[in-house]
Amino acid sequence: MTTFTTVLLFGGALTANLPRDFADVSTIRQVPDNQEVFLHTTGLTSIIFDITERLVSSRSAFSLRFHYTDIVTSSADETRIWVDFAPAALGKCRMSIPAFTMFATQHPSAAPSRSPQADFTGILLVLVRLAAQKTDIVISINVPHVADEYAREDVDLKARKPGPLPGAVIQMRDRILETFEVKDWTCLSTRKRRHR
């Protein structure tokens, strides 16, 4: 059973519950000011919080896909979207803040260049849209599926059988949505990344 703890993000400007067995990457390498990155202490799963400039488009479905493309475009890997633009609720927010989720996978398109090579990476994306602050907050949970670390017969995405790894990640996402809270709204304008 996963144990969660409250984590202060961006110096306490945001808070959310994350699993205890995830470590802050900034303690071992530099992370951009607009991001908070956490890595599983014994695995490859990562959780990334990214504060970005709000896209001008009021169409949230377009914005969600734009942010997803922004994450994966640096790679030539093939991507597939399995669940697109599902509305989500933020449990601790006192006001109505729109949030949306997506589930996609990224599959290597070339021979492995490093070891271990993931068969595919599951990507759970959450988009929180803050119109008044002209800010989008993108939360991505990335779970690589490496051979010998999961049972291939347990996974059939076409049959909506995600296997145990994405199941655990969905639990993480849901807990983040339940506990996500903005404590310092001014931080959002000073930390956000501008779009090119």
Image (cartoon, rainbow, N blue to C red):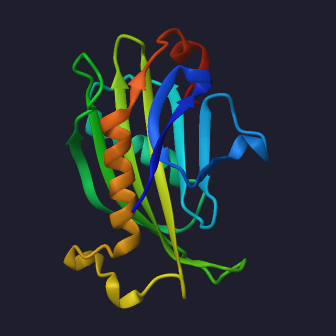
Image mark count: 0
Above or below, 172 against 186 in this view is: below
Question: Which quarter shows the N terminus?
Answer: bottom left
Q: Nearer the viewer, residue 196 or 22?
A: 22
Q: In which quadrant of the rendered image does the C terminus lie?
A: top right
Q: Quadrant of residue 95?
A: top left
Q: Compare residues 173 and 132 and report the one nearer the observer.
A: 173
Q: Residue at x 34, y 26 (%)?
A: 129
The residue positioned 62% from the left and 23% from the top of the image is 11
Residue at 24% across, 46% down: 85
Residue 194 as seen in the image, left or right of residue 106:
right
State the image quarter where residue 139 is shown. Answer: top left
Q: Is 4 positioned to the left or the right of 74 in the image?
A: left
Q: Position of residue 50 (x, y in %)?
A: 53, 35
Is 59 on the left or on the right of 53, as rendered?
A: left
In this view, 7 is above or below 45: above
| Quarter-of-image position of residue 59 | top left
Of residues 174 and 125, which is closer to you in this image?
Answer: 174
Question: How far across and down, in percent of the image, does residue 105 sit?
Answer: 41, 66
Q: Residue at x 33, y 57 (%)?
A: 170
Pinpoint residue 83: horizontal percent, then vertical percent.
25, 58
The image shows residue 4 at horizontal and vertical percentages of 45, 47
